[in-house]
Amino acid sequence: MVKDVTQHGSARAAEQKRRAADRARAYRLRKKVRGVPLARAIDEAVAEAVAFHIAKGGGVNIAGKMLLKTARLILERDGYDPEKAAVAVAARMVLTRDEFSWPDRFPTLKPGKAEHFRETEAGGWTTPLPTVLKHMASI
């Protein structure tokens, strides 16, 4: 494709967004064809597994192994390769993410001082920050 040097900024930005969306669609399709679930599909399967176990009467105290197995079965039901789904669910649920160690993020494995916490999406914390820190210490 020959670049149109007469394109205005907004038209150029729109074209870049279209190309980025096309690349993302192609990426998702390649993963789907290989049977590898996307993070969104894994999160949806885990949420459905939690809801299922609560509805079954198990309460909120769910064994991690049972949650992993149920989420994998849900992904298999949705057409993903069972082995790849099992690896993806385990990686998503078990592996520690980098952001867990950021002291200004909640939840964090390394809580800092209350005054170092970032503002919430809504602009401020409703729960007093000392209460948040006490909760993190009790987990």
Image (cartoon, rainbow, N blue to C red):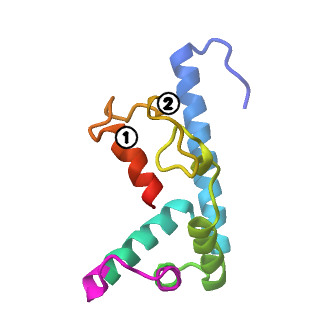
The part of the chain drawn in magenta is 54-69
Does 77 appear above or below 43? below
Q: SS for tag 1?
A: helix
Camera-nearest residue between 115 and 118: 115
Query: Dot 2 surroundings within 10 Å: few (below 14), some, or many (20 or more)?
Result: few
Residue labelled with disc 1: 130
Assign the N terminus to one quadrant of the image.
top right
Amino acid type at mark 1: Pro
User: Where residue 120 is drawn, which disc sits there?
Assistant: none
> How many labels were placed on the picture?
2
Assign the C terminus to one quadrant of the image.
bottom left
> In the shown orientation, is residue 94 left or right of residue 41?
right
> In the shown orientation, is residue 27 left or right of residue 65?
right
Q: Residue at x 37, y 79 (%)?
A: 61
Q: Residue at x 60, y 69 (%)?
A: 94
Residue 122, picture quadrant: top left
